[in-house]
Amino acid sequence: MISQKNHKTGSCLCGAVKFEVTGPFRDIMMCHCNQCQKASGHHAAATAASTENFHFSELAGLCWYKSSGHADRGFCCECGSSLFWRMVGQNNMSIFVGCLDGELELPVSQHIFVADKKKYYKIEGNAPQYNTYPK
């Protein structure tokens, strides 16, 4: 679901990757999969935007890791910040919400891969929960 039209900037921790989004964002999805846990140290909160509304202003530190046969993960190879996730062949970029500047007034629309969730935390709120990726 696309909820909010906005202009937002974002970056990695050291500033070697900077970007802006000039269009609508998807609602926030919370991903509890093992890959997101390993990449972020916890579960991931991600929104997404169309690649046509996504622009890099600095990409000196941008590196991509092919994490599976269908997806790549973008991170800063200078400071190690996890930033993006993109499905091969799709025209949108998933953006980890924590790398956006300021607040993003979007609801959490769903929790995915909850079968992989660690037991040390509880999922709160009423957003639907799926054991895998919903079809």
Image: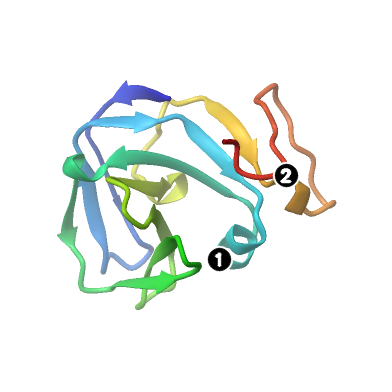
Camera-near label (2 vs 1) is: 2
Q: Up-down: is 95 above or below 88?
A: above
Q: Up-down: is 35 above or below 46?
A: below
Q: Nearer the viewer, residue 118 or 66?
A: 66
- Mark 2, Cα crowd under 10 Å, few <14 / some 14-19 / many 20+, is some
Q: Position of residue 80 (x, y in %)?
A: 44, 72
Q: Nearer the viewer, residue 74 or 91?
A: 91
- Residue furthest to the bottom in view is 78
**Alpha-carbon span between mark 2 and mark 1:** 16 Å
Q: Nearer the viewer, residue 5 or 134?
A: 134
Q: Which residue is mark 2?
A: 114
Secondary structure of residue under mark 2: helix
Q: Position of residue 4 (x, y in %)?
A: 33, 23
Instruction: Locate the C terminus and report the quarter of the image it occupies.
Output: top right
Q: Residue at x 43, y 66 (%)?
A: 81
Q: Position of residue 48 (x, y in %)?
A: 37, 40
- Mark number, residue 39: 1
Q: Up-down: is 95 above or below 77?
A: above
Amino acid type, callout 1: Ala
Q: Up-down: is 5 above or below 94?
A: above
Amino acid type, callout 2: Val
Secondary structure of residue under mark 1: helix
- Mark number, residue 128: none
The disc, 2 or 1, on the residue closer to the chain's N-terminal end is 1
